Image: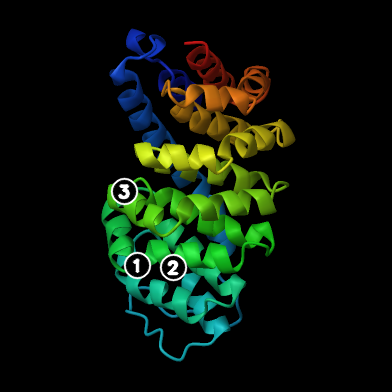
Amino acid sequence: ESEEQGSEEFDFPDFVWSCGNSEVMAFVQKLVAENASLKRQAASGTSLLSRQGMSGFPAPLASELFDPREVDADRAMAFASTITENDGHQIQPLVTLLSQHASDAKVCSQVCAALENLTFTDNDNRKTIVSHNGVEAILEFLKCHQVDDGSLLRSGIDALWNLTFDDEAVDRATDAGAIERVLEVMRNHPDDAEVQSGSCAVLLNLAVRNENRWRIVQGGAVGLVASAMHMHAMSEEVLEQGCQALYMLAYHPDLRPHVMAGKASEAATLATGFKNGGGRAQKWGKWLLEVLEC
């Protein structure tokens, strides 16, 4: 069944193969949003189990509204580890914990993992987090701890990835310097494949705004994405997300020369030659090469 779904996933209509057609980008944006959400939801099963019972402290029932006042780091982490996708009512306490424990990377990472769990498919939770200034709090975490271990930052990047499927979140993130924060994280953690793939996905979501696309290119993202694809040439996720981000930029004729100058063609060729996985990297590599030749 999964192989069947994988083939249908890339059964594009004929118009996708033409350049300069506005339908192409609308279709690709919809596909990327749905695929990323489903993929992250499937991946959450294992990671969620590893978050349960991580502390010797008794975990509060997630159904009860948590009071974040005067909570120490261990208690904050124990609480955050209990959060599932059904605990949207705990969003405000979680965002409060991000601010109260801003200097503790481990607490912030665990809270971001909880926010990630809440936003795989639930758009209402995304909007609630945005309304409580959660986007800004996550970006502050990434800024303050950008040189900490990449494993601690992954949940922040992934939570931001989930949130930026929401239009208001894109605008709030942009105003709070998300493009610059994400590029800094990429520069500081080139060896972490999960950080690199997640960062590419965030850039893809932010690139829905024309002014953001220019900021992304001018910030050096093309070179960073291409470098990540070369460094993690055996990671289907990095190759796929990298090609998607570069495709979004290269689709626009005014940006295409900048994408080509950043060695996107070499990165796309690398993706087309990927022999493992479900074929996603190869197909996105092919589409990126085609749009670069338009």
- Left or right: 121, with 249 as reference point: left
- Left or right: 21 as drawn, with respect to 162: left
Pointer 1: what residue? 133
**Residue at x-position 57% and y-position 20%:** 285
Residue at numbered disc 2:
137
Report how far apart the C-alphas of labels 1 and 2 lie in the structure: 6 Å
Q: Secondary structure at mark 3?
A: loop
Disc 3 residue type? Asp
Q: Pick whichever of labels 3 and 1 is earlier in the sequence.
A: 1
Residue 94, horizontal then vertical, whole percent: 41, 72
Secondary element at tag 2: helix
Residue placed furthest toward the bottom: 70
Total labels: the figure holds 3
| Number of residues whose C-alpha sits closer than 10 Å to that of mark 3, classed few (under 14), some (14–19) or many (20 or more) | some
Q: CA distance from mark 3 to mark 1?
A: 14 Å
Give yes or no for contact between labels 1 and 2 (Cβ–Cβ under 8 Å): yes
Q: Secondary structure at mark 1?
A: loop
Residue on which disc 3 sits: 166
Circle nearer the N terminus (2, 3)? 2
